[in-house]
Amino acid sequence: MHTLLIDDDLIGVFLTERLLRREAFSDDIVTLSTAHEALTFLQQAAPDELPRVVFLDLNMPMMNGWELLAALQPIADRLRGRCRFYILTSSLAQADTARVDEFALVAGLLRKPIDSEQIRLVRTQLEQAATG
């Protein structure tokens, strides 16, 4: 499965990549360290190059995860049905949980550091979406 990981925390990226491979979730992982890079990547990607899953860290400098999602709105129709976004956050803020509903591209919010149980939940959601 093609996966995009957007996170500026090198340790977090290392741990998440390792977990995704250990859980046999994905062996094709593209990692970008800024939301600006991700915006360009997603805007320019051909439909068959779009990632099936995007793990998006909220707290990044320059452009945060919410700002990236807002910037993707003009191409949301092209992404919908192809990319499922999962927000990664260490924040326990209720506002973050509530804000997820503002973006149709967002399939869920995962607390960092993510673990095997969360990856299995994402896999189950992907399987359900594919069959129903």
Image (tube, rainbow, N blue to C red):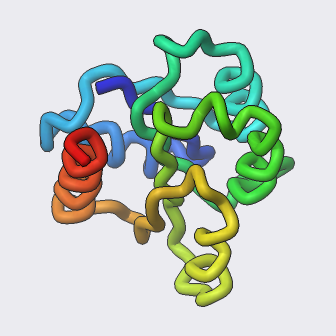
Q: Nearer the viewer, residue 76 or 67?
A: 76
- Residue furthest to the front in view is 132
Q: Position of residue 106 (x, y in %)?
A: 54, 56
Which residue is the extreme one toward the right?
Answer: 62
> Above or below — where is 105 with respect to 101?
above
The residue sitting at 44% across, 51% down in the picture is: 12
Q: Quadrant of residue 75?
A: top right
Query: In the image, 89: left or right of 18?
Result: right
| Image quadrant in which you'd find residue 97 | bottom right
Q: Could you tell me if residue 77 is visible in this image?
A: yes
Taking depth in this image into account, of 111 and 69 the one nearest to the observer is: 69
Q: Is residue 109 left or right of residue 66?
A: left
Residue at the image position 42 percent from the left and 70 percent from the top: 111
Q: What residue sits 56% from the left and 49% below the top?
A: 56
Q: Would residue 106 appear left or right of 126 to someone viewing this image?
A: right
Q: Position of residue 10 (x, y in %)?
A: 51, 43
Q: How many marks?
A: 0
Against 68, residue 28 (above or below) is above
- The answer to which image quadrant residue 8 occupies is top right
Residue pictured at 53% horizontal, 67% vertical: 89
For this rendering, which residue is in front, 44 or 73?
73
Residue lying furthest bottom in this view? Answer: 94
Query: Percent from the top left, x then y, of residue 112?
Result: 42, 66
Residue 19 shows in the view: no
* Horizontal and vertical percent position of residue 93: 61, 86
From the viewer's perspective, tell me whether residue 53 is left or right of residue 10.
left
Which quadrant, please, contains the N terminus?
Answer: top left
